[in-house]
Amino acid sequence: MIEGAPIVKTSYPMSVTGEKAKFFLGLGLLVSLTYVSVLRQQQPTGLECAALLSLTLALFAFDYLKVSQFLSIVEGREGHRRSHEQAIQSALEAVLRFPLLLEFLRTEVLVLYYAFFANYERNGVITEHKRFGYAGSSNAHDVFLFVALSQLPFLPFIHVIIEAIKGPGPAWAVSLLTLWSVIWFLAQVEAVKFRPIELSEHQLRYRFGLVCSADVPLSTIKLARHVDVSETFAGEDLFLSPIGSKKNLFLEFDAPIQFRGPYRLKRREIRAAISVDDPAGLLRELALRGVTIA
């Protein structure tokens, strides 16, 4: 269990400025390789190349300023009794000022943040809520290793084959989507550490990395209990924590609860089997708040 008592802020284990430089150098290299591959076939004029280069550099400069602003706001907002998640949401609203743009880019920004920057932020957060971790039962690290090792070693060969047959456009589309999937699972490894389950006097804020979340009023929890070792669940009318995670806590609700996924995916369920590293501790805290425990 992650305790809810005040935590002393720690210093950066590494420079965030250094991480920003690495991130944009890597992004610049990837964009350069894509441009060389695609433009070599298109054979643009010198003027067209200069215009494209100028636009690209301007966009890089704009993105660097926005990333710097975002990280600065996250760091500043964590010192005012806010959770890490609330600090990030506040920073997103400040940087992406238009609601539609925020909705459209929120998942992508969170993926990039957790994959490349979250581990270098000051992660000591003062909170009034009880917090329960689930990283130990999530298997996010193993999933990331499986995805990375099964895709990255073969990606250059697949890219060359597709480019030879279909051209650079389809080849880079496949390569970039593959890289994004690996980055997404890398972000999940960090997100399961930074987005704990939080329990207040009136609400259970369920989280599982970037995969799913739900805000459950305690008054709607009809029953909470341990999951038996031999117990199995079907996916019908039941929310299950992601594949591979250890389901060790069962919740039943008086009314359907909305569970939110990435890219605005939603589902409503009246029961849930979730993962938590300390199910006994969470059940004890729920009982103290009047929830029926079986």
Image: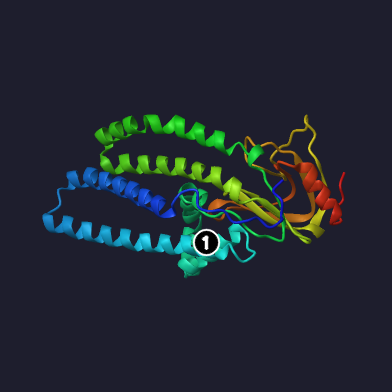
Q: Which one is in front, 52 or 5?
A: 5
- Give the image quarter of residue 164: top left
User: Can you give x and y, in whole percent of width and height, for residue 243 in the image?
Assistant: 62, 37
Query: Label 1 belongs to which residue?
Result: 74
Q: Which one is in front, 30 or 47?
A: 30
User: Which residue sits at x=84%, y=57%?
Assistant: 289
Q: Is residue 154 visible?
A: yes
Q: Is residue 211 visible?
A: no
Q: Which one is in front, 249 or 101?
A: 249
Q: Which one is in front, 191 or 48?
A: 191
Is 292 on the left or on the right of 260, as rendered?
right
- Give the image quarter of residue 69: bottom left
Element at badge 1? helix
User: Which residue sits at x=78%, y=61%?
Assistant: 202
Is 12 on the left or on the right of 63, as rendered?
right
Question: Total of numbered circles in the picture?
Answer: 1
